[in-house]
Image: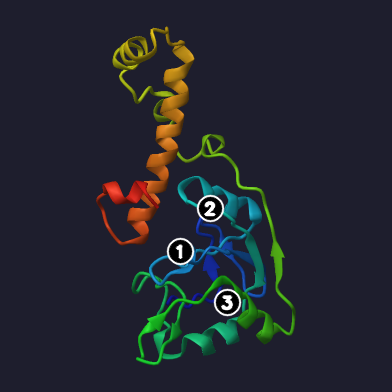
Amino acid sequence: MELNPDFWRRCSSCKNPIKYSANYYVCSVSTCNRKRIGYVFDSVHCWERHLPGARHKDAAAVEAKAPTFEQWKSELGDDAIAPGAAAPKPDGALSATGAKAPLTPEQQAAAVAAARGSTPQRVFAKPQAPAASKSVYKDSLESEILVVVSKLKAYVKERGDMNTSDSVSQLLSDRLRRLCDRAIENARVDGRKTVMDRDFDR
């Protein structure tokens, strides 16, 4: 884990530095706090930005306070490295086998709060619809039709003897993008570079 004298860690969304002793947020969903991920956010807004690609049924932003430089240095111990020496590792705790094990959001917030002598707060925010996050994709990808319109209209005509409005293809494309975003996140959590059929079922 990187030990930087100027700031604690960078926000997982905007990449802005989170200073020592500053307030920050973690996601209450355990998959966002696994060993290979370890998301931290400098604001609730940045926490909300990761929701379009995540499949959260009941998500919350858990507020905590970053450690001081001395506390962070002591926590890292021999694992501390100079900036740029190696890629940062997600936060974790030592398990009984000596391997790194991820902390839950509540454990992470409680541990930091205990060190600071404060009580962690849970800040609930309503997840935004994936289509509202315009900064995630290029405009062309957000507006592009992902279904074969002629085949869609032919299917509806054959099965129901009905015409299909042009707006249906845009709606279905938006929903298909949303399903793909969730499948991409599931594949990323599993450490894969390939999206598989089972990623759409979770």
Looking at marks 2 and 1 on the same chain, the residue that comes earlier in the sequence is marked by 2
The residue where tag 1 is placed is 31
Q: Position of residue 95 (x, y in %)?
A: 41, 88
What crowding class fits label 1: few (fewer than 14 Cα within 10 Å), some (14-19), or many (20 or more)?
Answer: many
Q: Position of residue 33 (x, y in %)?
A: 48, 68
The residue where tag 2 is placed is 14
Q: Secondary structure at mark 2?
A: loop
Looking at marks 1 and 3 on the same chain, the residue that comes earlier in the sequence is marked by 1
Q: Nearer the viewer, mark 2 or mark 1?
A: 1
What crowding class fits label 3: few (fewer than 14 Cα within 10 Å), some (14-19), or many (20 or more)?
Answer: many
Q: Nearer the viewer, mark 1 or mark 3?
A: 1
Q: Nearer the viewer, residue 68 or 166?
A: 166
Eyeballing the image, is 57 above or below 88?
Answer: above
Give the CA separation, mark 2 to mark 3: 21 Å
Q: Position of residue 27 (x, y in %)?
A: 56, 62
User: Is 31 on the left-hand or right-hand side of 114?
Assistant: left
Q: Nearer the viewer, residue 138 or 59?
A: 59
> Residue drawn 33% across and 54% down?
187
Give the CA separation, mark 2 to mark 1: 20 Å
| Residue 100 visible | yes
Q: Position of residue 60 (x, y in %)?
A: 63, 59
> Residue drawn 25% across and 50% down?
194
Eyeballing the image, is 195 above or below 188?
Answer: above
Q: How many marks?
A: 3
Eyeballing the image, is 105 above or below 54?
Answer: below
Q: Nearer the viewer, residue 135 or 142?
A: 142
Q: Nearer the viewer, residue 19 or 93?
A: 93
The residue where tag 3 is placed is 108
> Residue drawn 38% across and 22% down?
145
> Residue drawn 42% across and 80% down?
101
Say what amino acid the circle numbered 1 marks. Thr
Say what amino acid the circle numbered 3 marks. Gln
